[in-house]
Each structure stands twice: as C-alpha cells, then as structure tokens.
Amino acid sequence: MPILVVPVAFLAGGAVLVWWALRRRRALALRPSGWLPVTGTLVGAGASRRVEYVSPDGRRLRIQVPAGVPLPDEGPVEVLLDPRDPSRARLAEPDVVAVRLVRQLLLLGIVSLVVGLVILVVLA
C-alpha cells in the first residue's frame, strides 16, 4: 500500500501545477493587449535605473525599472506603449518571463500527471 503513495503524489502535484499554470495564464490574458512595442534605452545604474523611450508624438519619456527586473547593461530595451496615452508604458521583459514560466509549469504539471498515471497503471 505505501508504494501507491508515489503515483498519487505525482498525480496530486501534477494537478496542482496544471491548475496553477492555467490560473496564471488566464491572469496574463487580462493584461492590456494592443499596446505598441517601442524600443527604449537603459539610462542610469543601480537602484535608479530608468528606460527612456520616444513616444509617437516625439516626446522623450522615462519609466522607472523595478529592482527585480533583469535587463541588459547596454543596448535596446523593449517597452510596451499604451496607444491612447503615450505617457503610460511598461517593460515587455516581465511579460515575456511570465509567459515562459507559465509554459514551463504547465508542461511540468502535464508530465507529472502522465508519469503518475503510468506508475499507477504499472503498479495496479
């Protein structure tokens, strides 16, 4: 009987991962769509990092970079711009990382479910 704990653990863990990944995927879909991608430049260093970008009307605007966001030290940075209000912008990198994480968790959950089912069928 204790050997059945292993496939049940795989099934439970896989179910939780799939459930969580699907919730996160739904939350990502609620984020604004239709925002325009523009290229910005990283300005500053340390805690006062900012990204400077040019709005469609030619104004140079800056947004603060959160401390935990990994960005390159030099080069272009992708920024998503609100088409209705060019002063509203956000970095595209956290969205890309979040989509990649959700995809990996969904895949891991499905693999755990399949492994749990295979072990359960073999042991039964």
Image: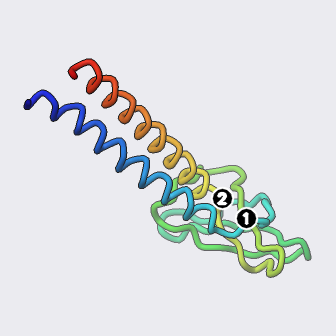
Q: Which residue is mark 2?
A: 92
Task: Give yes or no for contact between labels 2 and 1 (Cβ–Cβ under 8 Å).
Answer: yes
Image coordinates for residue 79, horizontal then vertical, percent: 71, 62
Residue drawn at point x = 69 percent, y = 74 percent: 62
Q: Secondary structure at mark 2?
A: loop
Residue drawn at point x = 77 percent, y = 58 percent: 39
Q: Is residue 75 left or right of 57 when viewed as pictured?
A: left
Q: Amino acid at mark 1?
A: Leu
Q: Which mark is residue 26?
A: none
- Of residues 4 and 38, which is closer to you in this image? 4
Image coordinates for residue 112, horizontal then vertical, percent: 36, 34
Q: Residues within 10 Å of mark 1 (few under 14, many from 20)?
A: many
Q: Residues within 10 Å of mark 2 (few under 14, many from 20)?
A: some
Q: Which residue is mark 1?
A: 80
Q: Secondary structure at mark 1?
A: strand
- Of residues 18 and 79, which is closer to you in this image? 18
